[in-house]
Amino acid sequence: MIRDRGTPGGGGAAPVGGVDDHRDESVCTSEIEHAHRNRAIAHMLRSHDLLDEDPTEVVAGYTRQCSLLVTARDLALMTATLANRGVNPRSGEQVVPERAVRQVLSVMSTCGMYDGAGDWATQVGIPAKSGVAGGLIGALPGQIGIATFSPRLDSHGTSVRGVSLFERFSADMGLHVMEVPPAAPAVVRSHHVRGSGANATRVLQLQGGIRFAGAERVVREAVQIPPGGTTVALDLTMVFSVDDVSRRMLTEVVRRLVLDGHTVHVVDPRSLLPDPDPDDRGVVVLHDLEDLLDPPRPGTTGRHSA
C-alpha cells in the first residue's frame, strides 16, 4: 500500500485505488512540527523494541501519508479494493496481498473508530476507519466498499453525517457483519442414481461456493457410497468457486472413491479441480454430465486419466 514511507513524494495509496499521489505540503509541514505526542509514542514503542526504525522517520512518514489529498471517490475506490480481497475493481490488478487485507480489516474492525469502536461494532457492524478531516470509509469483505465525506465531527472526532449514513446503509441493506443471512442452498444439490444395472451411475451434484464446511458435507455424502465397481459422477457444473482446503478435500474424495473400486467421472467445466495425475487410473474429467451417455474414449477428452 505504501511505496516509500520515509521520503517526500514516496508514500501514498496510489497502488490501492489508482489515486494520484498529491499531498498538502503546508499541512504536512505543520503537522510534523507539532507531532510531539506522536513522536513520544514512537520513542516509547522503540524503547520496547516494537519499532525497529528511527521513530522520527516513522512519524514523519506517517504524517506524510495523512497529508494526501483525496476525493470521496478516491476513498470509495480504496475501500472497494479492500472489500475485493485487495483486487482493484477497475483494473482487476491484485494491488494488496490478501493477508494484508485481512490484517487491515481486522484493525479497522477493532479500533478503526477509536473510542467509538464498541458502539460502532454493535450499531453498524462494518469494518471502518474515520479521519479528523471528515472522511469515513468502510469495507465489508466480498460485498461493498463505502466512503463518505462531511467535515462536521462528533465528540469522537468522527463525521456526524458519515456515521448517520453508515447506520442507514447497515440497517436498510442488511450490511452488519454479524447479521445472519438466510440459509443458503446446500452444497450437495442432489445425490441420486441414474440408470440401472451395469449402466447405473451414481451422481453427486454440487452447487455454489464450496468452503470447508461444504466440502465436509461432500465427504460425508461420499463415504455413504458402498464400495464396488460402479460409476460415480462428481458434478461441479453449478459450482462457481472452491477454496484451497476444499479443493484438496474434493481431490481426496475422488482418490478414495477410486481406491474403493469406482470409476469416477469429474464433471468440471470451469477446471476448479486440478488435472488428475496420470497414475490415477479410473478418473475421467468431463465438461458436461450428458457426456456420460456417450463415454469419451481415452485420448479424445482434454482432461482424463483412464
Image (spheres, grey):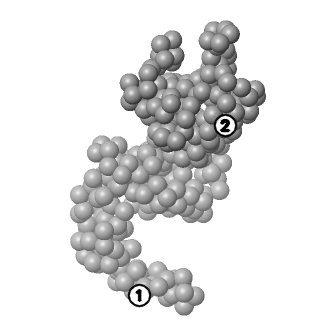
Query: Which residue lies most toward the bottom here?
Result: 47
Amino acid type at image mark 1: Asp
Q: Earlier in the sequence, mark 2 or mark 1?
A: 1
**Quadrant in the picture for the N terminus:** bottom left
Amino acid type at image mark 2: Leu
Mark 2, secondary structure of its residue: helix
Residue 40: % across, % down: 49, 86
Q: Is residue 224 visible?
A: yes
Please name the residue shown 32% across and 44% down the image: 92
Position of residue 158 in the picture relative to residue 60 (left or right): right
Q: Is residue 4 above or below residue 183?
A: below
Residue occupied by mark 1: 54
Please name the residue shown 31% across and 68% down the image: 3
Task: Depth check: give the residue in front, 3 or 229.
Answer: 229
Q: Is residue 34 above or below residue 126?
A: below
Position of residue 217 in the picture relative to residue 16 (left or right): right
Position of residue 172 in the picture relative to residue 76 (left or right): right
Task: Depth check: give the residue in front, 77 or 90.
Answer: 90
Residue 286: % across, % down: 46, 25
Q: Do the residues bearing badges 2 and 1 touch, measured as CB atoms within 8 Å?
A: no
Please name the residue shown 27% across and 78% down the image: 7
Residue occupied by mark 2: 259
